[in-house]
Image (cartoon, rainbow, N blue to C red):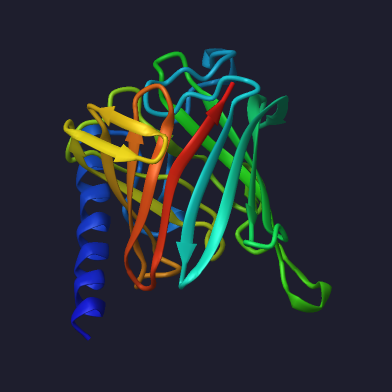
Amino acid sequence: MRRKATAALLCLAIAAAVAAYAAQAGLGFGGGECATYDPKIPSPSRFAKVIDNAYFPLPAGRTLLYRGVENGRKELDRVHVTGRTRNIEGIAATVVSDEVYEPVGKLKEKTFDYYAQDERGNVWYLGEDTREFLPGGKVDTSGSWLAGRSGAKPGLIMEAHPRVPDAYRQECRSGEAEDLAWVVGRGGSQTVPYGRFHRVLRSLEFSRLEPAIVDRKVYGRGIGAISERQLSGGHETLSLVRVAG
């Protein structure tokens, strides 16, 4: 009961932070429902050809390998920045492949994420196509969304200059994708199997669709996400073990 109460308080705090920061900055990243969310995304001509944000770089050809545990079961997560783009709302979005494998090498989940960086250095999240492979040959595509379709709107995955206590929506399709993030720390060091990182960025993330779950993510300069830990709602950890490209 205590863990559930803590999770609820964290969720409320993150939602309040999103709303407060949005009002102060005039960014439109409202803390309410998706229907009232109005992101101030730049026009397509004001987007860069490459994504080189310090905490979320996506150079073509890079592959990141993570190992972790979800509810007692080991898993492997392979993230690959493809050389392809997809036109979403007139923006050439970088296509990133994310594959999650079980210990026996069986593909558990496959997702294509779509990102684009504006000329100021903010990285926008424009959608995802996700497939979770279930027993009996069934495939679950819930959580998929594309900006501009079925009421979905773009979110911000990483600011150009993230600071405490910035907060923002990462994605917004009502009932399908409603993740929010709150920057809670910048500075200090973090060691993962791949190596030691300095001047890291820390955030708390949660979704209104799963209010009992709160994740803590750590980002390393020049790499992106280096570790993830579920603080409530289950047990999941993920750490960076290898980078190629």
Q: Residue furthest right?
A: 137
- Counting the numbered discs, the total is 0
Quadrant location, the N terminus: bottom left
In the rendered view, tell whether residue 8 sits above or below residue 101: below
Q: Nearer the viewer, residue 97 or 86?
A: 97
Residue 188 picture location, percent across and down: 16, 33
Quadrant location, the C terminus: top right
Asked whether, in this view, residue 39 is left or right of residue 132, the answer is left
- When asked about the image quadrant of residue 144, the answer is bottom right
- When asked about the image quadrant of residue 115, the answer is top right
At 71% from the left and 28% from the top, the residue drawn is: 87
At 43% from the left and 37% from the top, the residue drawn is: 156
Q: Residue furthest bottom?
A: 1
Asked whether, in this view, residue 98 is left or right of residue 56, the answer is right
Residue 237 picture location, percent across and down: 40, 58
Residue 244 picture location, percent across and down: 58, 26
At 26% from the left and 41% from the top, the residue drawn is: 202
Asked whether, in this view, residue 76 is left or right of residue 206, the answer is right
In the rendered view, tell whether residue 139 sits above or below residue 179: below
Asked whether, in this view, residue 136 is left or right of residue 98, the answer is right
In the rendered view, tell whether residue 126 sits above or below residue 101: above
Residue 226 picture location, percent across and down: 39, 39
At 28% from the left and 33% from the top, the residue drawn is: 26
Q: Nearer the viewer, residue 121 or 78?
A: 78
